């Protein structure tokens, strides 16, 4: 599959990445290589195989609805790039 | 041209579990910012979500009550988007295998009966709350709500009027309240509704371009937003313009919808299976046990109230429309109040108070025990009905004890025959003109005399006893 610069732009918007022009060119090549590898996998006939979403044969892992103490807020906020006394701060996100 | 409005609903309902969907933090509403949080619900790297058993149970119960097929093999999926209300940058939801599908809900409007098809019902996590701080021009993130369990109920585009939408929402709310899976408080955001709306020429088979409306916080807002948006789209089309597919925000103060610029980009959520949560398999035994535990719903109860208690259909319908009223009614009756009396007080004096105070039944302080006591005092002839109404009004706001209130205000009925006779004698003496009119055959002046005697006794007598004493004295 051919990867265009427009596709790279779109993917970088979705990923919130700002790519310099020269990197975009490199990216088209790298993404094309990745998809080419997928094409190898696509040569296998999987029409009779159930799609798998989980590797381990476990199911129904649930917990009881019992409240446990929450985390110390100071601990939670400790590594935030920006914060105040009680909340995480981010650039303006609401209208 | 005659236009037809086509509406589909997506309703998000917060489940009434004690803990969040994937961690053991409390779901309690309110609380200081970020105090109901842990590394799981704030999306710290390396944490693992574990499903709350109760969420699955509540979602399956809701699906059964909405006549859905329950998915036996469930999976979760990741919905990816960058927005700071979701610290993981993805929401764990169900796309490919929602827990319930293909249901239907019967509704009744003035136009008649109708069935609304349920497309699907799935489990997901709620997002956090963002508050913009204009002083620092930054947004503050509170993740207390992040990870609170939700079910999203998606209908087919089966609605044609605002009335149908409201009838469906009332039915849905009542059903979920009966099940006890949600408290459905719109003002606290535990029931939220997005409305998808398009218009088309009547008789057309294809759908018009739809818009999605958000920020609808009450049934009234939903109804007004639908009427506004339908008119806006029709006007556009009649002017030869076209409707743009977009998300619009309803502004309750301006009575209009507005385009939300931030949502202009077509969403690309890149869903994929959630690798951190193993599949959930619901056994036939499990579903059978849930079916057996389904509570008696509104219709069944309404019929039973008519049959067992002899309530009129209208009264039974009014009470069973809200689970809070049902609980209040049943408790009052269990405390010995005659069902008809209890229903009359609830639908009369109580509903009037609630309306005046703009309160929801579930928020009132008055207890069934207190109403039962009031009804008992009337039955025992200790207070009359007028006094009882007055007492009801007085104790309603804070649930002051009825017995104490009556005693402290000296409202107990005068059942002392001597006192009644004395008052009668006094009134007859003071009104010789009226007495002779009565004796001359003008029976209706008796009412005036009863009133005068009641006034003498400060309203505390049994009107029947006064009536009888007057008639005896006038013989």
Image (cartoon, helix red, strand yellow):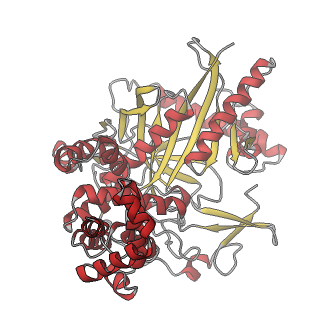
* Horizontal side of residue B239 vs B120, given as left or right: right
Q: Nearer the viewer, residue B321 or B36?
A: B321
* Horizontal side of residue B81 vs B123, given as left or right: right
Indicate the position of residue B148 as horizontal and vertical percent values: 47, 61
Indicate the position of residue A22 as horizontal and vertical percent values: 82, 44
Q: Nearer the viewer, residue A7 or B18?
A: B18
Residue sitting at x 41%, y 27% = B114
Residue sitting at x 28%, y 51% = A59
Quadrant hosting residue B371: bottom left
Which residue is farthest bottom?
B408
* Horizontal side of residue B394 vs B371, given as left or right: right
| The C terminus of chain B: image quadrant | bottom left
Indicate the position of residue B421 as horizontal and vertical percent values: 28, 78
Judge whether residue B60 can be spotted in this image.
no
Q: Nearer the viewer, residue B444 or A73?
A: B444
Residue sitting at x 38%, y 79% = B426
Residue B346 in the image: above or below residue B399: above
| The N terminus of chain B: image quadrant | top right
Q: Nearer the viewer, residue B10 or B303?
A: B303
Residue B278 in the image: above or below residue B203: below
* Horizontal side of residue B89 vs B272, given as left or right: right
Indicate the position of residue B234 as horizontal and vertical percent values: 72, 23
Judge whether residue B202 can be spotted in this image.
yes
How many labels were placed on the picture? 0
Residue sitting at x 39%, y 42% = A53
């Amino acid at each position: 599959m051919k990867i265009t610069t427009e596709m790279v732009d779109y993917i970088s918007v979705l990923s919130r990445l700002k790519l310099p022009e020269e990197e975009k060119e490199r990216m088209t090549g790298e993404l094309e290589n990745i998809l080419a590898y997928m094409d190898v996998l696509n040569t296998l006939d999987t029409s009779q195989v159930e799609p798998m979403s989980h590797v381990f044969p476990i199911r129904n892992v649930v917990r009881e609805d019992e409240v446990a103490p929450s985390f110390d807020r100071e601990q939670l906020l400790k590594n935030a790039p920006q914060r105040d006394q009680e909340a995480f701060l981010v650039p303006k996100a609401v209208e | 041209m005659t236009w037809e409005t086509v509406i589909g609903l997506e309703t998000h309902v917060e489940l009434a579990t004690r803990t969040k969907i994937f961690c053991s933090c409390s779901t309690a509403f309110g609380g200081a910012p970020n105090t109901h949080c842990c590394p799981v619900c704030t999306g710290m790297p390396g944490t693992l979500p574990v499903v709350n058993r109760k969420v699955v149970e509540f979602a399956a119960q809701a699906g059964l009550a909405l006549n859905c097929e329950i998915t036996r093999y469930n999976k979760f999926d990741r919905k990816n988007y960058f927005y700071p209300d979701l610290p993981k940058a993805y929401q764990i939801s169900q796309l490919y295998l929602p827990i319930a599908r293909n249901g239907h809900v019967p509704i009744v409007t003035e136009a008649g009966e109708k069935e609304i098809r349920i497309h699907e019902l799935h489990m997901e996590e709620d997002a956090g709350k963002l508050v913009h701080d204009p002083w620092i021009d930054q947004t503050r993130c509170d993740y207390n709500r992040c990870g609170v369990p939700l079910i999203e109920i998606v209908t087919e585009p089966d609605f044609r009027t605002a009335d149908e939408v409201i009838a469906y929402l009332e039915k849905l709310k009542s059903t979920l309240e009966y099940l006890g899976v949600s408290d459905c408080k719109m003002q606290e955001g535990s029931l939220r509704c997005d409305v998808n709306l398009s218009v088309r020429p009547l008789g057309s088979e294809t759908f018009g371009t739809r818009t999605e409306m958000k920020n609808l916080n009450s049934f009234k807002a939903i109804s007004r937003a639908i009427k506004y948006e339908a008119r806006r789209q029709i006007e556009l089309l009649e002017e030869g313009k076209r409707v743009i597919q977009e998300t619009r925000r309803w502004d309750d103060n301006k009575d209009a919808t507005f385009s939300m610029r931030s949502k202009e980009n077509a969403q690309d959520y890149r869903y994929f299976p959630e690798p951190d949560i193993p599949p959930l398999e619901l056994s036939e035994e499990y579903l059978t046990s849930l079916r057996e535990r389904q509570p008696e719903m509104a219709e069944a109860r309404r019929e039973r109230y008519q049959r067992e208690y002899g309530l009129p259909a209208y009264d039974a319908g009014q009470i069973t429309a809200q689970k809070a009223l049902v609980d209040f009614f049943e408790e009052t009756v269990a405390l010995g109040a005659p069902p008809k009396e209890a229903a009359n007080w609830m639908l009369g004096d109580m509903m009037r108070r609630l309306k005046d105070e703009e309160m929801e039944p579930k928020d009132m302080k008055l207890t069934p025990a207190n109403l039962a006591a009031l009804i008992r005092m009337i039955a025992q002839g200790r207070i009359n009905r007028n006094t009882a109404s007055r007492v009801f009004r007085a104790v309603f706001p804070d649930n002051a004890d009825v017995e104490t209130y009556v005693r402290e205000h000296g409202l107990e009925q005068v059942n002392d025959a001597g006192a009644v006779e004395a008052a009668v004698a006094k009134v007859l003496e003071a009104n010789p003109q009226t007495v002779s009119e009565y004796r001359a055959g003008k029976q209706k002046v008796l009412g005036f005399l009863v009133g005068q005697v009641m006034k003498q006794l400060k309203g505390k007598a049994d009107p029947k006893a006064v009536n009888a004493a007057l008639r005896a004295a006038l013989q």
